[in-house]
Amino acid sequence: MHEPICRIRLSDLAEHFELPFNGNGDTLIDGVGTLSDATPSQLSFLSNPAYRGQLKTTRAAAVIVAASDVDDCPVNSLVADDPYVAYANIAGRFDPRRPAMPGIHDSACIDPGANLGNDVHVGANAVIGPGCEIADAVSIGPGCILIADCTVGENSRLVAGVTICEGVSIGKRTIIHPGAAIGSDGFGLAFDHDRWIKIPQLGSVLIGDDCEIGANTTIDRGAIGDTIIGNDVRLDNQIQIGHNVEIGDHTAMAGMVGISGSTRVGKYCMFAGASGAAGHLSIADRTTVNAQSVITRSINQPGTVWSGTIPAQPVREWNRSMAHLRRLDKLVRRVLNLEKNRTKLRND
């Protein structure tokens, strides 16, 4: 169990984050927790109405609530227009993980042709190849590999075991989680009579500022030109981004999304888990794709929601549905014949 990294007075939190508070401002907060599990020294929040019933019995020291829930809160409260956003801003103050300290581990391998800025952290067994440019206050965790000619912007963090291939550019304040591989070859092949020929992948990957790349996510380098990830793009774990894909600013994708090569995704889009898009498409800004849905044609109208899944159901119901589906073609032909005969009878 982690010891509290700090204890902060409720009134100080309220002042720092510009939130009104109710109750005892001298209450000390040393962590965060859920409404049901928070201890009397932890801060919690209520944003989903489904959990409103837990507010009455919470043991938290204080709860972040909307103004409409203040009267129902039995403990101290911070009042926010969006309690979840307020929680996201505050929770980082209680992160128990150790920050990376500047310095280079003895086992790290840094090419003489690499250039490191000030206050850089390089962990054990990390490799930084020739021509790499590492800006100030970057953290490169244990086992990370930057092959050659990579650029990493200020205050970015490669957590551990990250592979960055040749020529990849990463912006400022970007986090890349363990196992991610950025800039590997895209799936470029040409079939020549009886064998495959590899198409050279001559582009690279450009990642913007304030992005987050999840664990074991892969982003392929461009075949011609670059794969481009905009600013404030959030990619979850185990995502595949194909070569020459472009993802617009502020777009978020949940786990196991797949975007095929040369597709352009707009700004502020959201892809739910295991969804995806075929290649060479254009997807408008603020498009939402629901879980397990696959986009197979371009979307030109901004702000639309797309879904193409069949929800799970008991296996007996599913078997009946599939039996009906297999007879669908015969049923369609029957309906067409009936309509044709009906039209003929009317004409007669």
Image (cartoon, rainbow, N blue to C red):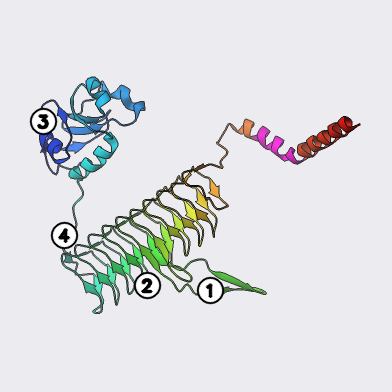
Which tag is nearer the camera, tag 4 or tag 1? 1
Whole-number angstrom distance, CA of label 4 to CA of label 3: 31 Å
Which numbered tag is attached to residue 101? 4
x 56%, y 42%: residue: 308
Q: Please state the horizontal and vertical placement of residue 152, each as a whole percent of the image.
A: 28, 66
Answer left or right for 345 relative to 211: right
Q: Are marks 2 and 1 in contact (CB under 8 Å)?
A: no
x 36%, y 51%: residue: 250
Q: Which residue is mark 3?
A: 27
Amino acid carrying label 2: it is Glu
Please report whichever mark, 4 or 3, sits nearer to the chain's N-terminal start.
3
Residue farthest to the bottom, as pictured: 112
- Compared with 220, 215 (above or below) is above
> In terms of secondary structure, where does tag 4 sit?
loop
Nearest the viewer among 105 and 286 is 286
The boundaries of the magenta stretch are 319-329
Nearest the viewer among 76 and 210 is 210
Q: Quadrant of the C terminus?
A: top right
